[in-house]
Amino acid sequence: MLRNILALVGCLLLTAVLSAQGDEPRPPMPFSDPNNQGGWVLNPEVSDEFDGSELDTTKWFIEGQDGRYYIWKGRAPAQFAPHNVIVEDGKLKLRTQWEPDYPFDQGGYSESGSDPYGAFEGQPLPVTTAGVVTKKRFLNGYMEVRSKAGHAAITAAFWAIGYEQELDVYEQMGAPKIDGSILSNSVRTAVHDWSPPAVRPTQAFGYDEKNLPYRTSDDFHVYGAEWGEDYLKIYRDGRLTYHVTQDELGTDWVLNNPMEIWLDSEAFSWLGLPHAAELPVDFEIDYVRVWQKPDDNLLDRAFYGFEGPILYQDKPRPLDLVPESSVPNEYQKFWLLDTASAKYLSIIEGEYATGVNSLEFRGLEKNETLTVDKVVALSPEGAVDLPAGEYTLSVKVWLDQGRAPETLHLGLEDPEVVIPVPLEGIERRKWVELEKCFRKTTPSSAADQFRIEIRQSSLPDLRPARLLIDDIRIRPVE
């Protein structure tokens, strides 16, 4: 503890000296990479130092505020209540308390049986708690908090969800009453697969770090997750504690789409429940910081890698948008295939250059001919936004043995740009990256779309081979 205090004093003195010299203080760096060897850049939209007297609601959704709940109201018997979200002393405090007069929702929670919120096994258990969610999502990066769990049988959780996926960076409980999956001196990390049918147990992989030299409610510690395109690293106080790669997991690697951060406290009845004398307690978070690495790709990497929807994050996120939902709405939209094209084009799982999906042109069977002039996969409107300029388009393709299509036609809709990508002579049964330069003389309109087209005129007369497409990217020519 003394060491932590001395380190903090030293940091404050250094900041004061720099300020006196007229220099800007150095921006915070990941605790696991203090010299920024990874080239990280802070993302302010999903980071927060929790200064001031109230939570910044331009960044955060507060569960229950103005009677609005996102996805759920908490894990019964405890219910999220907005007044339990407190910002003071430079920290976010998510309070859990005993409130017999709180108007608990009587609908309950499906996983908790027939009891309404505020009751357990037919008896009153009026516990309120709190949850907050970032309004923006992000794809890949390093996310970190400095936090301390509340000392009661209530969780402290730092987690994230996106399309068909969930990452629990940690689940902690300061004082469980029943020995089980989470102890007072343990940290649970888990990744869940929410692709339909999302039947529990949904856990795809994870680990438990047990026998920590402290209880998670004793003091503040730093917890981080480095989430890469094909790997996950978990850190505690700057030390790597878990590392897993997609190469080890195959299609169990589900962390392929942008995620939002959750901070909340929940009641886990199987680990015991808090009572009045033990409350109130606070789950305290000193900061949330997210760093990412610069990327000059101008397309949404998850969407153009066929992993999930493209997000329109300037639109309100539907309050009932669960991770397993593939229903298009104003917030999330998917590739468009007309009826004729859907006979030949589909997004498939298990064959990919990166992620777990690719777009398949299935080829034609013996004596089969393409019944339309072309098959097309079209992005939603506004899924591409490019100024005028010169660009390099790249695409990864896999061509089965057989007669190759002559050309893959890619392009933009408004204004129209056609980008033919020759396929003849490429190596078979191997992912090959192809590049093509193009010029755009007019900026994209608000309704611009990306087009993937296979024309009948580009196909051989007999049985064209199966073709897979993945990882479409556009970068500016410098």
Image (cartoon, helix red, strand yellow):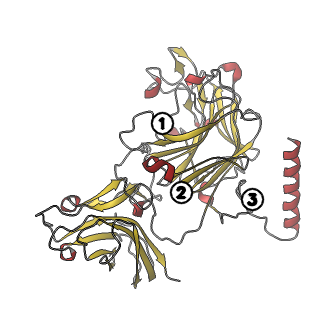
Q: Earlier in the sequence, mark 2 or mark 3?
A: 3
- Residue 214 visible in the snapshot: yes
Left or right, 73 with respect to 96, comes to left
Q: Is residue 270 above or below residue 334?
A: above
* In front: label 3 or label 1: 3
Point out the image quarter for the N terminus.
top right
Q: Which residue is mark 2?
A: 138
Residue 124 at x, y percent in the picture: 55, 16
Position of residue 79 measured from the top left corner of the image (x, y, whole percent): 55, 30
Distance from the alpha carbon under mark 2 to that under mark 3: 22 Å
| Secondary structure found at label 3 | loop
- Dot in front, 2 or 3: 3
Q: Is residue 23 left or right of residue 440?
A: right
- Identity of the residue drawn at 60% across and 55% down: 46
Asked if 436 appears above or below 228 in the picture, the reply is below
Q: What crowding class fits label 1: few (fewer than 14 Cα within 10 Å), some (14-19), or many (20 or more)?
A: some
Reading the image, the residue beneath label 1 is 72
Query: Label 2's element?
Result: loop
- Marks 3/1: CA–CA distance: 37 Å
Closer to the chain start, of discs 3 and 1, is 3
The type of residue carrying mark 1 is: Trp
Measured from the top left, where is residue 148 in percent x and y? Answer: 71, 38
Q: Residues within 10 Å of mark 3 (few under 14, many from 20)?
A: few
**What residue appears at the point 53 percent right and 57 percent down from the top-left corner?**
138
| In front of the other: 152 or 61 | 152
Residue at the spot x=49%, y=55% of the render? Answer: 258
Q: Amino acid at mark 3?
A: Pro
| Kind of residue sitting beneath label 2 | Phe
> Relative to the observer, which residue lies in front, 233 or 302?
233
Which numbered disc covers residue 34? 3
**Residue 338 percent coordinates (x, y):** 22, 61
